[in-house]
Amino acid sequence: MQGASHHDISVGPNCWIGAKVTILDGAAIGEGCVIAAGAVVKSGSYAAGGIYGGIPARFLGARIADEQ
C-alpha cells in the first residue's frame, strides 16, 4: 500500500546492476557503472565507469584504469 516512487532517478547506458540493489530517489548513476548486488544507492551522483557497493553504496574502484 506504500507504493514506490521513482523521482529523479537516472541510470546511464551500459550499467551493470546486481541483484536486489535498492536505488533511492535522487540517484544519478553515470555511464558504465557497476553496482554490486545488495547495494543501497542513495541520492547523489555516481561517476561514470565507477564500481560501487555496500550499504550505503560507496566507490570501490574504476572499471578502466587511467592510462599514462
Image: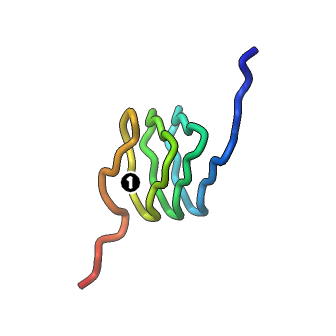
Task: Tell me the SS state at disc 1.
Answer: strand
Camera-side residue of 31 and 2:
2
Give percent across and percent down for residue 38: 45, 33
Residue 8 left/right relative to 36 = right
Q: Is residue 55 above or below residue 47?
A: above
Residue 35 left/right relative to 68 = right
Mark 1: few/some/many CA within 10 Å (<14, 14-19, 20+): many
Q: Quadrant of the N terminus?
A: top right
Residue 20 left/right relative to 49 = right
- Please give the name of the residue rendered at 40% of the width and 59% of the height, measured from the top-left corner: 50
Q: Amino acid at mark 1?
A: Ile
Give percent across and percent down for residue 39: 44, 36
Give percent across and percent down for residue 36: 42, 43
The image shows a total of numbered marks equal to 1
Judging by the rendered image, the residue that carries numbered circle 1 is 51
- Please give the name of the residue rendered at 29% of the width and 71% of the height, measured from the top-left corner: 65
Q: How is the image coloured?
A: rainbow
Camera-side residue of 7 and 48:
7
- Please give the name of the residue rendered at 38% of the width and 33% of the height, measured from the top-left corner: 55
